[in-house]
Amino acid sequence: MNKKKNISEEEIAKYSNVYSEDSKPLENSKRDWNTITIISLWVGIIVSIPLYMLAGGLIASGMTWSQALFVIVLGHTLVMIPSVLLGHFGTKYAIGYPLLSKLVFGPKGNVFPTLIRAFLGCFWFSVQSWIGGTAINSIIVVIFPSFEGIFFVKFLSYVIFLAINIYIGYSGSKALKIFEQTAAPILILLSFAVLIWAYNVAGSFHSIFEYSYKFSNGSNFSKMFFPALTAMIAFDSTIALNISDFTKYVKKQKQQVIGQFIGAPLMTAFIVFVGVCGTVASQIQFGEAIWNPADLVSKFDNPFIVIVFSIFIMIATMTTNIPANLVPPGIIFSSIWTKIFTYKKAILLVGIISIVVMPWKVLENPNNYIFEVNGTLATFLGPMTGIYLASYWKEYKTNVVLFDLYRTDGGLYHYSNGWNIIGMVTLLLSTLIVLIGKFVDVPVLKAIYESSYVFGLFISLLLYIFIIKYFRKGNN
């Protein structure tokens, strides 16, 4: 069978399958994204409050502005390599991440890694919704000062923001595309407003940089470099993992490659610069390095400033939160449990799961946010990414028979009763190798954990290739 041949619904219905309206290959008429759309997607993801907070957090943790800029841009550039390689699957076959994962792990084994991605998305959706809710709370407090410090008002603001995100995600890819392209220029414009404020506070950008050096502890850079780099890679690695959910809307590989490599690194450098200037200016203006922009906005007495920049925070958070954290779990849940959840029902499920998470604990301090959360996430995401790359590019050489891919009762990708044992063992071993350094005080193991995404990716990639070469005969 030709791997690109359209699937007959009558023929696939003869077998147990995951073929549905939500999972089937997109028609060409619906694949209307291009290079600009992909750039806009990454502008929306990168020009975000969490990345601003990463930049500010590194400054607050003792890095100089140049060190923070270097680490963050390097991390976000490196993660574009697996993002582009995994995006190839979406553009070539017009289908998304859940089916890529099924190809690699089998119809039953697929559940575990995709659910890891889904629940990580739910976690981040909750965290970023709290950040956006803080902005709504700032607007409420500036109008009704007596509500300041009341947790119920903060929680209600969080739920309101979460509901706005769900509404946009519920409306589908067309609404997301329009939202991302509309929001991108607004975010860039308001980012320049932050730069102007910081410039006025410090007197010049040169003064900002000098001030950064004065209050930093650059001597710790060597100790912070690898944990910080891993955290930066982990920040984008979730969206890189399921980037095929978006590249499936693009018809040409050239468009997704150029769009990703232009959109992410350039906008990363820009928003890091904004984050550095905003954090240093807050130290000059208010006597403390305020790394959370929502907290920074609340320091101003001018209601107009509070409202405008709170809206900025809301838009910047949504442009990241919806495509990176809400849509992927919705697609995964609806793909795994096709008979229970449609995509729209799954989006609502993500919202419910997110409400039971306590995101305010994560945001208590920059070290917790940067090193503990992102560093731990990288130990899972790196090994998963390595296995996907090894299987799709080396094992199958990007050639997939779609008909067998949708089957759950046999075919080329059924493996051992629905489980790719080699993939599962590789994932378990490589994850344990990088995770053990978190709990065992051995220098070599600590070094592996501090670079867990990179080590995890290469360990799993090489291990998987080795095993399939010597233990799985007759493969594609």
Image (cartoon, grey):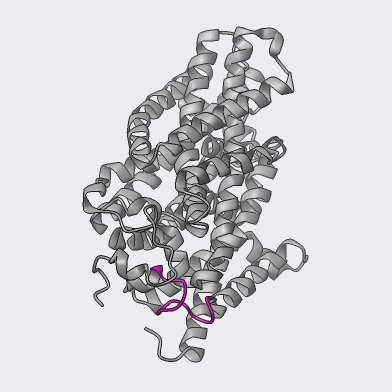
372 sits left or right of 386 in the view: right
- Residue 24 at what x, y percent from top left? 35, 58
Looking at the image, residue 434 lies above or below residue 377: below
Q: Nearer the viewer, residue 341 or 173?
A: 341
- Residue 271 at what x, y percent from top left? 45, 36
Q: Is residue 409 magenta?
A: yes
342 sits left or right of 251 in the view: right
- Quarter of the figure with residue 429: bottom right
Q: Which of 28 and 74 is in front in this view?
A: 28
Residue drawn 63% across the image and 68% down it: 431
**Is residue 179 at least partly visible in the picture?**
yes
- Residue 459 at what x, y percent from top left? 55, 73
Quarter of the figure with the N terminus: bottom left
Q: How many labels does the image show?
A: 0
Looking at the image, residue 464 lies above or below residue 71: below
Residue drawn 52% across the image and 39% down it: 51
Where are the magenta residues, as a range? 406-418
Looking at the image, residue 305 lies above or below residue 151: above
